[in-house]
Image (cartoon, coloured by chain):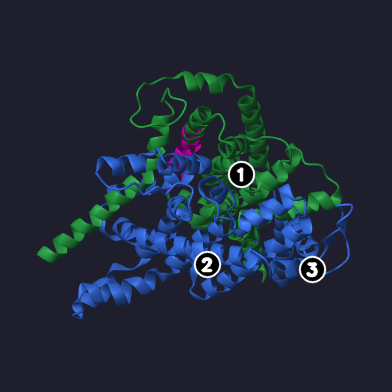
Amino acid sequence: MKRRLLARGGLWLWVWAVLAFLFGPIITIVIFSFDRSNIETLPIRSWTLSWYQVAWHDEQVRQAFVLSIKAACAATVLALLLGSLAAFGVHRARFFGRDTVSLLLVLPIALPGIITGVALNSTFQWAGISLSIWTIIIGHTTFCIVVVYNNVVARLRRTSATLFEASADLGASTSQTFRFVTLPLIATALVSGGLLAFALSFDEVIVTTFTAGAQNTLPIWIFGAIRLGQQLPEVNVVVTAVVVLMLIPIIIAARLTGRDTFSASSTRAPTN
Amino acid sequence: MDPDNGVSTLEPATSGGTKSLRSSALSHRWGTAFLLTPPLLWFFVLYVSSLVLMLITAFWSLNGFTGNVTHQLTGANFHQIASGSYPAIIGRTVLLAALVTVTDAIIAFPFAYVMARVATQRAQRLLLVAVLLPLWASYLAKIYAWISILERGGALNWTFQHLGLPSPNLGFTNGAMWLTFSYIWLPYMIVPLFGALERIPGSLLDASSDLGASSWWTFRHVIVPLALPGLVAGSIFTFSLTLGDYVTPLLVGGANSTLIGNAIYQNLLDGGNLPLAAALSTVPIAIMVAYLLVAKRFGAFESL
């Protein structure tokens, strides 16, 4: 009995240590974003919000932010459309190739993201397509589809087919069944999938580097600034803002769909 | 939307006999095709054909004078990969990916076990959120955090100094890379492992102890084998994500931290040598395909 208690205590100790490991670094950057000093030194001597002001007025950061938002919106809309179509199709399919289709759809996240990036880049070069916001959107949509697909297909699997049959037996037309039965049942899965797709696109850097050319999305701006070691206090502020901004869609998505949000492949970005 | 969403199968059997049954099955099939065509078209035209083109590009070469891609098949890129510094880079990448995977498995297992089998329902929900939030926190933010923790004047050295210990000076080394990767991918290991552990029926554990097994024996011979698919599923993520990353080595690594991803990145974006970059890209693909084939035998796909 005593040994059992000891084992349990050890397990919980482990859990707390892992939680500290998971949250410590994130808390560190949030704290440092209020540090007045140009170079990070401990202990922090004086606090300020001025780096937030600097970042807010930085034209490059603004442009990068706007491009990221635009690309994420477009990719989310396309992914919602294509991902839910795929989910409905695979769900009702009884054909032999069903598993192949679902395997194909997760390929962009099962293979390293850089593969998607190089593959798309070689296609754009070969076809003479110059890199623009559209090439960014194409790349993002390709892996965002998976997120929407996973969310919707998980919901459809748990929805009993008898509901649709009942609707038809009671004389509803196909479009009525879709509008009054199917859509309300999958609505939260769609919203949640869309939010996750948005977050995924907004934060993506591995694929985007190969599809963006000379343009800066916000993650590409951050990547470049860290690499050159320039404007680091500003970087600190921007990454803190991104973390906080991304929390919003994630928390809403988690509330809407609960466990589905946690399905590993729906949370897995190609980057990341 | 589709013309007969999910309702076609019931009605004809009562109303129309075999003929309409067949026509209904036909229209069901058309409906499915109608739904699947747009997403599959996207995937084949943009993704799969790009992959195929990349594989072909790997056998092209770069004209040394003009810098243009010559569309003549040659194995020269693969000869180049098999020589020089590339084998060492590939070896380093695979070793690091394996190391990160093992590290995450060790950290994640007790955590996922508590989540799945020890914690109350309320605690379980909170722990799930606690894993989800860092998973979705910005990738670059997490990398930046580790740079500022590990660098010379960073939080780690500072803490060690105040404890009277020698500074570890981990910043910009392979050790920093290992730590950062293990940190960033940890939630991807916890989630599928938790799923697998949670699915183990409690009756199996009761049966094991009723039959006189010690808790260690039960752990070793009941829990671990049943958690294995989740472990393998998590390892697909940790392994694959490390294999293709170039941002982490570039930002937190040091002089000897070049991975396959960096070699691809340099050849394509700095050197403009698309054929060589494409040839290098086949290496992670080949490794992942082999890995996935093995993973499939462990039943990992159901846990993805």
| Residue identifier under label 3 | B76
| Residue identifier under label 1 | A205
Question: Which of the 4 image quarters holds residue B257?
Answer: bottom right
Q: Look at the image and give the residue range highlighted in magenta.
A: A244-258
Residue B69 on image: x %, y %: 86, 56
The amino acid marked with disc number 3 is Ala
For label 1, the SS is loop
Mark 2 is surrounded, within 10 Å at the Cα level, by few (under 14), some (14 to 19) or many (20 or more) other residues, namely: some
Tag 2 and tag 1 share a subunit: no
Compare marks 3 and 2 and give the one earlier in the sequence: 3
The amino acid marked with disc number 2 is Phe
Look at the image and give the colour of chain A. Answer: green
Q: Residue furthest left?
A: A2
Question: Which of the 4 image quarters holds residue B240?
Answer: bottom right
Q: Which chain carries label 2?
A: B
Q: In this view, does A48 lie above or below B24?
A: above
Q: Which residue is painted at 35% across and 32% down in the image?
A: A42
Look at the image and give the colour of chain B. Answer: blue
The amino acid marked with disc number 1 is Val
Question: Which of the 4 image quarters holds residue A4?
Answer: bottom left
Q: Which of B26 and A15 is in front in this view?
A: A15
For label 3, the SS is helix
Is residue A94 visible to us here?
no
Is residue A35 visible to us here?
yes
Q: Mark 3 or 2, which is nearer the eye?
A: 3
Q: How far apart are marks 2 and 1 (CA)?
A: 27 Å
| Residue identifier under label 2 | B301
